[in-house]
Image (cartoon, rainbow, N blue to C red):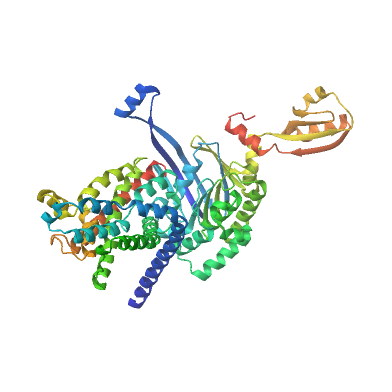
Amino acid sequence: MPVIRVKDLSKEYLVADKQPGLIGTFRHFFSREYTSIKAVESIGFNIDRGEIVGFIGPNGAGKTTTLKMLCGLIHPTSGVVNVSGNIPSLRKYKFLKDITLVMGQKQQLIWDLPPIDSLKVNAAVYGIPDKEASYRIQELALMLDLKEELNRPVRKLSLGQRMKAELLASLLHRPSILFLDEPTLGLDVNSQLRVRDFLYNYNQKYQATIILTSHYMADITSLCKRILVIDKGQLFYDGPLAKLTQQFSPSRLVRLEFNEQINFSLLKHYGKIIKQDNYSVKLLINRNDLPQKINNLLNNFSIRDLEIADPPIEEIISKIYSNKIE
Amino acid sequence: MFKKLFTKKRSRIFNLYRVFRALFISQYALMVEYRAEIALWAISGTLPLIMLSLWSNSQAIYSFGYNPINLAHYFISAFVVRQFTAVWVMVSLEEDNLEGKISPYLLQPVPPIFRYLFSHISEQFSRLPLVLLMIFLLFLFKPNYFWLPNIGSLIISIGTIFIAFLLRFLIHWIFAMICFFTDKASSLERLLLIPYLFLSGMIAPLEAYPEQIKQFALLTPFPYILYLPSKMLSSQSFNQTINIEVLFIWIVVLSIVSVFTWRIGVKHYSAMGA
């Protein structure tokens, strides 16, 4: 049974328009004109308990608006949202204890105090007994590799340490549903890895449902089996990541390394040349023709090494966003 | 069944106590970090002492029943009351609204008002030593102004000052809900400052006002914020139409209003994008 159910969910905003210049300013002062912006348009999906779902789309696609509707921060214009049997916008006590929202660009920790002070407040707010809170803090700190950082003022922490402390604060009450809006934003590669590992372990340990938005495709590919792709407020893909690659990129990427220099124009019959140098080439070959063409290549050329892979997911997503699907 | 209900209620009260204690401790720690700023705020709250120096040489004070000593007691009390009824919730809420900091608070199972309330209460505690030092210095230079209220009236005065603070906090909180509709709601704080200065008894005791203005002031909550607790702290008798019961009525009425305005504000905030 799905833990998150979304049906025909829409959100519209009224935005005041202002013409440039002095006359525009005067007009704006006396009579304002508003335009209705459809941030999210009739989307629907179900998510089961324990799933990690990647929610991707270009800037302004409607990802954060959808997350905010799912956690009850904003009210939908129309449609149905049900999260673990609750209507999020009512923000009932039981619902609030069951969820968390982590936003990479926003923080809840008190800036001038060590994270431990904010954690103690959160423990009291969620009714976690002192002893249990200490145990959970230790457990999560270990998973996140946080030690003495918990006793340093937040302003003195690095971005990575701060994000890990934010995660700790957001998960202290052990929510079963996590809404994560770019939790690795601005982090270095090591910190990104650590956060990803942590989220994976948390999901495994507590069977938590996670919806994750991120512009780093590595976050999505390493954590999410299923993705939702949204653009201009509309959901246009909901399914496994692997299927997205097949659906939107009918070719596979073949890298060949030759024993000798060859005439690259001969390779045009096999596929689209992406990159070439003296002894190697990258080709995009249609999936259906792949076995036959690889066979021909091995017969016709002296090949030292061969590698077949899907094109990088970033490229596929980028093509989807810019409507340049092959 | 009653035992179960009682245990549940006791547990809720205990949880609320834990929340208040944690908020107080963390906010007090934060205020101690800002001790230099708090010292400046405390010094900036000396308007009643400036008014004392202006009024003390005036013969007019005798016409409304004061002499230089009890006038000094009134304004020194007003200075203390002002220190412990300072409210800046409109500025805080506007800032949190614009920076999106209020969103995480809305997703926690405790009403956000408590965060702001305890931020003010803990600031009062961090301000206390500074105010005591300022009073000590004042009495050192003006020993004839010294007086000591008896312990009973001191306790009642402290309680009244706290309730007066709650009243001012509620007024500002209600107006702060405008933050959910416009980006520059804190400008209203300046608008509120005018009736506060004139009707609360800050620039002169209410007895100095023409009868009509005095009657009008008594219809507003402002005299209960400063005049009433100042008169109590200075152990002076005061207009019987002003009393603690009315202060409580204002608290109850404004608490109800604040619940409704909060709901309307948050609903609009949630509708516009949070």
Q: Is residue B274 above or below residue B207?
A: above
Q: Is residue B169 above or below residue A187?
A: below
Quadrant in which the C terminus of chain B appears: top left
Viewer-nearest residue: A122 or B74: B74
Question: Where does the image place residue A111, in percent across and percent down from the top left?
Answer: 50, 52
Viewer-nearest residue: A106 or B186: B186
In the figure, is residue B106 to the left or right of B155?
right
In the figure, is residue B154 to the left or right of B219?
right
Question: Where does the image place residue B92, in percent across and percent down from the top left?
Answer: 39, 49
Q: Is residue A31 visible?
A: no
Q: Is residue A286 above or below residue A143?
A: above
Quadrant in which the N terminus of chain B appears: bottom left
Q: Residue at x 47, y 49 (%)?
A: A5
Question: Where does the image place residue B45, in percent across and percent down from the top left?
Answer: 32, 52
Viewer-nearest residue: A138 or A177: A138
In the figure, is residue A75 to the left or right of A129?
left
Question: Where does the image place residue B43, in percent across and percent down from the top left?
Answer: 36, 53
Q: Residue at x 59, y 33 (%)?
A: A320
Q: Is residue A104 visible?
A: yes
How many marks overall?
0
